[in-house]
Image: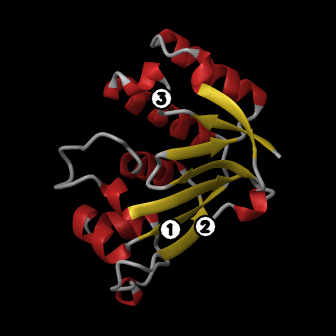
Amino acid sequence: MKMDYLNQDHPALKREEAKRAFAVDELVKRATQCSHSFRIQFDASRLVRVIGEQKLLKLMPNFVLHDARPSARLYDTYADTLDPERAEILRELLALLPSERYPERPLNYIKSVRFLDAGGATILRGGDFNSFILFALPTNVRQALLSSYHDRDIPADVLEQVDVDVRRLEP
């Protein structure tokens, strides 16, 4: 299947961290707007230490904290429907730049995330702590994304078409 890839090593993004952070945030924002659900692979014990139990449970109300895996080599996985509050929390947690809200960047403890449409098809998959982002936005949403990139002097060629075996995308 053909998907788009956000090339964060593109010279226009690599030179300016603020542009790269904007490009990722804008992409995540648009993906959440057309997604029905999400799946996340993360280190719960460390993530809860950074964002707090209340924020984690707002995002993942059915997650049992005491079942969090203590090993740094194993990741917890959670899936749920996406509503505006969860979408906003995920945007916050997936931000590339550190926030004053947290003692360290929450993204450090999120291995991967997928946003899915109502039929279960992948809208966006961020992997390797969001350094590698694949997505398949509806055409009008993709055009709006490119328009917002253009407004920030981010060239369209930061998006590249790649062939992907979607069955291998995790979580």
- Measuring 77% from the left and 63% from the top, which residue is drawn there? 167
**Disc 2 to disc 1, C-alpha distance:** 6 Å
- Measuring 68% from the left and 60% from the top, which residue is drawn there? 169
Residue 136's spot in the image, x, y percent?
72, 40
Mark 2–mark 1 CB contact (< 8 Å): yes
Q: Secondary structure at mark 1?
A: strand
Q: Is residue 106 left or right of residue 26?
A: left
**Mark 2 vs mark 1: which is more N-terminal?**
1
Vertically, is 41 above or below 130? below
Vertically, is 55 above or below 148? below
Q: Is residue 76 left or right of residue 142?
A: left
Q: Secondary structure at mark 3?
A: helix
In the rendered image, which quarter is residue 168 located in?
bottom right
Residue 123's spot in the image, x, y percent?
69, 46
**Disc 2 to disc 3, C-alpha distance:** 23 Å
Q: Secondary structure at mark 2?
A: loop
Query: Which quadrant holds the C terminus?
Result: bottom right
Q: Residue furthest bottom?
A: 67
**Mark 2 vs mark 3: which is more N-terminal?**
3
In the rendered image, which quarter is residue 71 located in?
bottom left
* Residue picked out by circle 3: 23
Residue 62's spot in the image, x, y percent?
50, 78
Q: Residues within 10 Å of mark 3 (few under 14, many from 20)?
A: many
Residue 115's spot in the image, x, y percent?
62, 53
Give the label on residue 68, or none: none
* Residue picked out by circle 1: 41
**Disc 1 to disc 3, C-alpha distance:** 22 Å
- Measuring 43% from the left and 54% from the top, which residue is drawn there? 129
Vertically, is 83 above or below 47? above
Looking at numbered disc 2 in the image, what kind of residue is underneath it? Pro
Q: In the image shown, does 168 or 51 lie closer to the viewer?
A: 168
Give the label on residue 171, or none: 2
